[in-house]
Amino acid sequence: MRVDGTPTRTIWPLANADAVAIIDQTALPHAYRVLRLASLEEVAQAICSMQVRGAPLIGVTAAYGLALAMVHGDDDATLLAAVETLAATRPTAVNLRWALARMQRCLAPLPRAARAEAAWQEAARIADEDVEQCRQIGEHGLQRLRGASGGRERLQIMTHCNAGWLATVDHGTALAPVYAAFDAGIDVQVWVSETRPRNQGLLTAWELAQHGVPHTVIADNAAGLLLARGDIDAVIVGADRIAANGDVANKIGTYLKALAAAAAGVPFYVAAPRSTIDFACPSGAEIPIEERAADELRIVHGRDAGGVRGQLQQVPASASVVNPAFDITPAKLVSALITERGGCPASAAGLLALYPEERHA
Ligand code: MRU
């Protein structure tokens, strides 16, 4: 992706500095700010506070977090403690545990002196693979989108949350096919739901604008109307975890969109790489749902009339609040999963046909 015309990833190692750079996603869309993370603690805090967010990017960031931990101590106890610290940051996106397990498999057998260097290399490999897989998701998703407009001049796509470039290292998952379609000259318009309470839809709008893709922001509650009256050709979302039976955990509000899409006969696609599929998790019922702080609902962030960034309390402190961050969309509401290996039905058989090496698991 380009930020103001400059090709940019969402995370990159700082040469000879034992640090990584990230884009502070809590400042967007109001300010573009790059932060330097130089310790395990800073990485853990960046994930918890959602300065970095989105399942694939959380995994890659955690991998770099382990590399930073190894710089400051390369013994087994440090490795184990760092894995535990990072694993505790966010519970739902399985990419986090997937990346930590891969890093552990790589580092644990090595002599201590070799671990730090190997950790940087493995984290960079995970990042590069994420870029390539997202690019492939874009290619496969594009095949689904070609001709989906049913004769309409402009292809109308709805998405939820941010499953774009910002949620990965590059390209995105749900937005990768959108970028591929746009780059292929297809006239595409994206309907972006705000995604209360953290408003990740505004991140989606920001990055679509950076790429020049036409888009419109809607309140979350407007999605049902648009789908019911035939304004939308397809819905594409990302995932934080896909269970072995094809059930999908994604940002709160995804399930409502899937229900509305099914009622309207609109295809509902879920795009995600292998690192988001949890073959050890039988169904959505076993996926842990993150419960986040009530203040995320109570307090809204923005700019005042003078352009100054600030916050306002919208929900009184006396009001009872719950803030589940994800929901489960049952496999039966998903038209297809789109992965780096292609599309498949959202079912155990569909997933295993794409990933036959998981049959033994
Ligand atoms: O809480 P977030 O912002 O990390 O949640 C992100 C999502 O739910 C995304 O839709 C999902 O991670 C897919 S990202 C490619």
Image (spheres, rainbow, N blue to C red):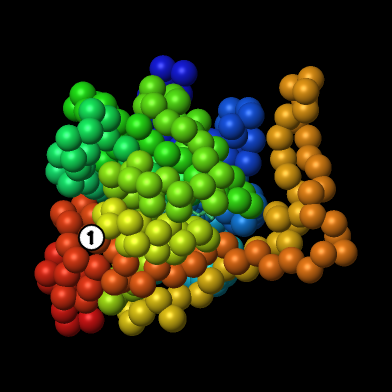
Image quarter hosting the C terminus: bottom left
Above/below status of 279 relative to 50: below
- Secondary structure beneath dot 1 equals strand
* Residue 258 appearing in the image: no
- Kind of residue indicated by mark 1: Ala
Q: Is residue 349 or residue 171 the one in the foreground?
A: 349
Query: How far across and down, in percent of the image, does residue 88 sit?
Result: 58, 68
Give the residue at the far top of this rendering. 5
Q: Quadrant of residue 7?
A: top left
* Residue 26 appearing in the image: yes
Image quarter hosting the N terminus: top left
Q: Residue at x 79, y 68 (%)?
A: 320
Q: Is residue 28 or residue 307 the one in the foreground?
A: 307
Q: Residue at x 29, y 64 (%)?
A: 334
Q: Residue at x 46, y 62 (%)?
A: 256
Query: How far across and down, in percent of the image, does residue 250 sit?
Result: 44, 61
Query: How far across and down, in percent of the image, does residue 170 sit?
Result: 36, 38
Q: Mark 1 points at which residue?
A: 336
On screen, residue 305 versus residue 338, left or right, reads: right
